[in-house]
Image (cartoon, helix red, strand yellow):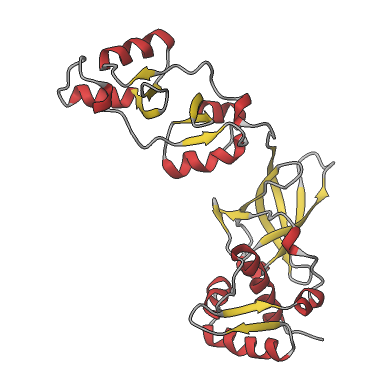
Amino acid sequence: MDLSPIQKDILITLITLYHQSSHSIKGEEIADVLKRNPGTVRNQMQALKALGLVDGVPGPKGGYSPTANAYKELNLGDLEHQSEVPILRDGKKVKGVRVAELGFITLCHPDLCQAMARIIGSVKLFRVGDMVTIGPTPVNKLLVRGEVFGMDENLQALLISVSEMISLPKQSIKHYMSTPLLTLPLTATLRDAIHLFNTHHIHGAPVLQDGGALAGIVTLSDLARGLDEGLTVDTPVAKVMTADVVEAPSSIRLYELVGRFKERAIGRLIVVEDGKPVGIVTQTDIIRVFPSL
C-alpha cells in the first residue's frame, strides 16, 4: 500500500515511542514529537487503523499501538529484541527517534569523515547544522559526534560530518576505582578529616558506621563550609557530611556513570559490593578516561 509522507512519519514515530515506553501511545504524544496539530494526527490515525496498521486502545490510559502489518509495511525488523541506540541533540535525547544503522561514507579523506545514520523516526525533527551524538552502540560501545549536513527523507537518514569518535571501554568501574578506600569513622572530627585529606592528598572520603555500612561522605568543601560557619575542628564530621551518597555497584561500566555525575552535580561516588563500600570514583577518573566528555 502507498502511505503518504505524513502517515509514514506518524507510523514510525508511533513504533519508536511504543518500544521506548512499552505501552499504548496517545495521538498528542506523536503530535508533540512531530510538531503537528493533534487533530491532524488523530485523523491520520483513523486512516491507519482502517488500513490495519494500528490498533486503538480505549480508556483514559489508552491510545494506539502498531500492528504486525505496520512493521511489514515499513520493512522494520523485530525491534523488541534490538538494543536501542539513542541520538542526542545538544546533549538531550531526541524523543521518538532511534538509530537503526550507522555507516561511514568517507574514511580515507585526510580532512573529512562523514557518516550516514538511518533512523527509526522522522528526519524532519532535525535541521542542517544540528550537533548530534549517536550511541553508544551495543557491541563496540562506539560514540559518534558530529554536525548534520544533510538529510535523505526516502532513506530516513541523516548525513553527518563526524568530528569525533570514541570507543567507550567495556570494563566495569572496578577496574578504574581508587582502592584501598580511605574512610573516616562516624566518630571522626573535622580535625581527623583534615589530617586524612592532607596526608593522602584527597578531597573527599566516605564516613562509615561501626559495622562498616556507609553513613555519608565528607569533602573538602564541606570542611571549609563548616569552619566558615564557626564550627571548631573538634566538631564531628557528621555535622557537615552529606548523608545522601551516590552509590554504584562495582559491576557497572564506567561510561554508564557519566550521566550520574552530570545529573547529580557530584564530584565523586562510592563503589559498593554486597552493600559495603569498596572504592571511590571521582570526576578526575572519568576525565582521565574520557577527556572530551
The answer to which of 23 and 76 lies nearer the viewer is 23
Q: Is residue 101 visible?
A: yes
Q: Is residue 118 visible?
A: no
Position in image of residue 64 (x %, y %): 61, 79
Q: For residue 93, which quarter of the picture?
A: bottom right
The answer to which of 120 and 183 lies nearer the viewer is 183
Q: How many marks?
A: 0
The C terminus lies in quadrant? top right
Residue at the spot 72% in from the left edge and 62% down from the top edge: 80
Q: For residue 158, which quarter of the picture?
A: bottom right
The answer to which of 287 and 200 lies nearer the viewer is 200
Q: Is residue 75 above or below residue 188?
A: below
Q: Is residue 251 above or below residue 73?
A: above
Position in image of residue 222 (x %, y %): 29, 27
Left or right: where 39 falls relative to 221: right
Q: Is residue 256 above or below residue 124?
A: above
Left or right: where 52 falls relative to 35: right
Residue at the spot 71% in from the left edge and 65% down from the top edge: 120
Q: Residue pushed farthest left?
A: 230
Position in image of residue 97 (x %, y %): 64, 63
Left or right: where 45 falls relative to 215: right
Left or right: where 284 falls relative to 188: right
Q: Residue pushed farthest top?
A: 199
